Image (cartoon, helix red, strand yellow):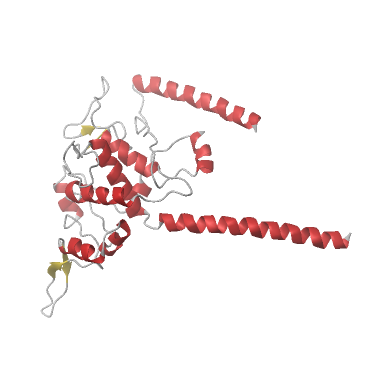
Amino acid sequence: MKSFLHVLAALGLSVAFAGQAAAQEHEEGATPHYPLRKPVEQNWSFEGPFGTYDKGQLQRGFKVYREVCASCHSLDMVAFRTLEDLGYSEEQVRAIAAEYEVEDGPDEAGDMFTRPATPSDHFPAPFANPEQAAASNNGAVPPDFSLIAKARAAERGFPTFVFDIFTQYAEGGVDYIHALLTGYDEEPPQGLEIPEGTYYNPYFMNAASLAMAPPLSDGQVTYDDGSPETVDQYARDVAAFLMWAAEPHLVARKQTGFTVMIFLVLFGGLVYLTKRKIWAELH
């Protein structure tokens, strides 16, 4: 085991030296690798094999999404009725759904019409089509947020991903979202050209800048539970909410997995004892 750790440590040093060489190449004009800076691993209530969602945090994150993100980003795969998992009552879910308009039809005349949403409906998109979304956002189509916490994650590289297997690290998406939302304050390095109409963010995984302006600011969203109204807290809460949107059954999956592991251990023990008994009689 110690020799294995020594090998990993040596490989880690090799990766570090390779990273330094890559940085020197970047300074000399080589093609940079994105993101320019890796997201910092955060602490989440739902991390690890026994992690669970913090419903208070999810409700705060949902509020940030509604008041800040929903004007551009859709939640096409999330139904209003699933908000009960966040701790809302059936009446509250109906009231939230009724605040949105959805298209329905056709009616008896063959025409489409709009109506207040019901709990069985999904969150409506803020734009009628991708072309309208691009025209309203400097040519960039805002991504749907339904699965973004699982679909977007920065590569952690070797040997980090080896340890992730044992620690069951699966929060790369929320770490990335938090880093991206809090990474606008940094100044671009000298010599790096930022295209006009974009904003530098070293955590963006596709380029050095993106079309989305800094969406959060201190005091932007009012919390009713006394939580800090800061960019960092907003980013944590909305990232946690998006994790729930992408994997609403995470807690149940972990409970099932733990039960299966206990069963496999007991089953393996019974198989071993059975094997011992059978072979003992044969000999």
Residue depicted at 50% across the width and 40% down the height: 164
Whether residue 163 is visible to the viewer of this picture, yes or no, is yes
Count of marks, rendered view: 0
**Is 30 situated above or below 52?**
above
User: Which image quarter: residue 2?
Assistant: top right
Furthest-front residue in view? Answer: 226
Looking at the image, which is closer to me, 131 or 234? 234
User: Which image quarter: residue 87?
Assistant: bottom left
Looking at the image, which is closer to me, 50 or 17? 50
**Is 112 situated above or below 209?**
below
Furthest-right residue in view? Answer: 283
Residue depicted at 32% across the width and 59% down the height: 85
Residue 160, image x and y in percent?
49, 35
Give the quadrant of the N terminus. top right
Residue 154, image x and y in percent?
39, 38
Residue depicted at 51% across the width and 56% down the height: 257
**Is 63 situated above or below 110?**
above
Residue depicted at 61% across the width and 57% down the height: 264
User: Which image quarter: residue 179?
Assistant: top left
Whether residue 206 is visible to the viewer of this picture, yes or no, is no
